[in-house]
Image: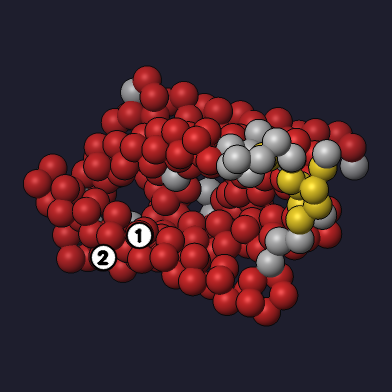
Amino acid sequence: MATEVQLVNMEINTMILSHFWGLMTRPDEEWDSIRKHPPGIIRLYLTQIIWLAALPAACTFYGTTQTGWSLPGSEQFVRLTESSAMVMSALAWLAILAGVGVMGAFVQWMSETFGSKPTMAQSIAFSCYTAFPLFLAGLCGLAPSIWLAIVAGTIGASWSAWLLYTGLPVFMKIPKEQGFVYASSVLCIGLVVLVSLMITTVILWSMGAGPEYVQVL
């Protein structure tokens, strides 16, 4: 049993790192490879997406419960209770999982307009790897800071936008002019999904799932 778990973990690390490195060094070839050999949706989620989504959730849980942060104009550090942070991290993890699937569904839904017909697995794979820099930006959750979050978020969002605009024409095998319009549409939908998640967060907070603070001297 332990050997099987180790093999699965090795497979996860190998697939994620190989695709990530490939998108940095030879993006066109890597996008073509991802399209030709996409894993099934269940396999894609179990071996990659759930772990990538857990990265920002786990880092934020640790940062908000162990590291803490100081409020502007105050020398006191603030942390979240573990129970509060656990609930919020779990909800964030589920929201990311749903967000990747929703974006993949929209990518496939719009594809016929631009003369491409990817499978749902291919579309979700594209959504996952395009968002990879945003998952990495979640590492800043280990040291909660508004400025660090802004810098990491800006870099991650810019990197993901670059992957989207340069990779979509190659992945969908469409002209660059159509790819630009397609990518812009996907980006707009991504912003709508983000706003929807923010609204859902506010609703959940009002229902009692909000943060509980602990002051640390």
The local secondary structure at tag 2 comes to: helix
Residue 18 x %, y % = 52, 27
Figure quadrant of the N terminus: top right
> Can you identify the residue that label 1 sits on?
191
For mark 2, does the 10 Å Cα neighbourhood hold few (<14), some (14 to 19), or many (20 or more) residues? Answer: some
Image mark count = 2
Residue 90 x %, y % = 71, 59
> Can you identify the residue that label 2 sits on?
110
The local secondary structure at tag 1 comes to: helix
The quadrant holding residue 10 is: top right
Query: Which circle's residue, 1 or 2, is located before the other in the chain?
Result: 2
Which residue shows up at 31% across the image and 68% down it? 109
| Amino acid on which the number 2 mark rests in the picture | Met
**Going by the picture, which residue comes out furthest to the left?**
177
Residue 102 x %, y % = 45, 65
Camera-nearest residue between 92 and 16? 92
Figure quadrant of the C terminus: top right
Could you give the CA–CA distance between mark 1 and mark 2, rounded to whole angstroms?
16 Å
Would you say 62 lies left or right of 128 here?
Answer: right
**Going by the picture, which residue comes out furthest to the bottom?**
207
Which residue shows up at 67% across the image and 79% down it? 207
Would you say 94 lies left or right of 6 here?
Answer: left
Camera-nearest residue between 157 and 211? 211
Residue 200 appears anywhere in the view = yes
Which residue shows up at 12% across the image and 51% down it? 178
The quadrant holding residue 59 is: top right
Q: Are marks 1 and 2 in contact (CB under 8 Å)?
A: no
Q: Nearer the viewer, mark 1 or mark 2?
A: 1
Q: Which mark is residue 125?
A: none
